[in-house]
Image: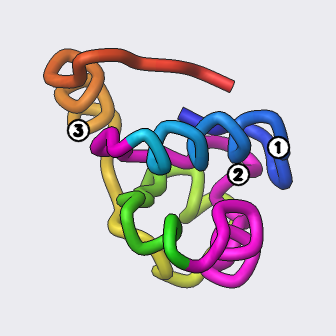
Amino acid sequence: MVSRLNDHRAWDHIRAQALAGAEVQVLLLHDAVLETEASVARALGEPESNKVVVMACVEDATRRQVPERWALVDYAGIIQRCVAADKVTTW
């Protein structure tokens, strides 16, 4: 889960996990929902950006009037993903 816009430390960690072959799902929260496809591709590198699934909290995206660019997940979906995940890292 990434909550800050342009959080390079988080994206570096995500890129490293993708390079290691991990299945990586990223959930954008708070101001991080303002990330764009281009900013994520720059942060991850083009090949790795295709290996990472990016989703956004629907409530945060709606509050910030972000157009639907990511799959949107409600609070119940966030909890379900956390429970189902092998590991959850929050940035």
Give 22 or 79, whichever is nearer the viewer: 22
Lower sequence index among marks 2 and 3:
2
Q: Which of 5 and 50 is in front in this view?
A: 50
Callout 1 amino acid: Asp
Res. 86 visible in picture: yes
Place of residue 44 in the rendered image (x, y in percent of width and height, measured from the top left): 65, 62
Q: Provide residue 79's location: percent of width, then percent of height.
A: 27, 24
The label shown at residue 46 is: none
Of the image marks 1 and 2, the number of the one nearer the N terminus: 1
**Label 3's element?**
helix
Tell me which corner region of the image, top left, top right, bottom left or bottom right, holds residue 46: bottom right
Secondary structure at numbered mark 1: loop
What distance separates the C-alpha of mark 1 from that of mark 2? 8 Å
Seen at 49% across and 80% down, the residue is: 69
Q: What element carries label 2?
A: helix
- Residue at image mark 2: 32
Q: In this view, does 76 lie above or below 11?
A: above
Foreground residue, 27 or 59? 27
Q: Could you classify mark 3 by the number of other residues whose Cα lies within 10 Å: few (under 14), some (14-19), or many (20 or more)?
A: few
Tag 1–tag 2 contact (CB < 8 Å): yes
Q: What stretch is highlighted in magenta?
A: 21-46
- The tag earlier along the polypeptide, 1 or 3, is 1
Residue 65 in view in this figure: no
* Labels 2 & 3 near each other (Cβ < 8 A): no
In the image, is residue 37 part of the stretch drawn in magenta? yes
Residue annotated with mark 3: 77
Exactly how many numbered labels are in the figure? 3
Residue 7's disc number: 1
Q: State the residue in front, 32 or 87.
A: 87
Residue 34 vs residue 15: left or right?
A: right
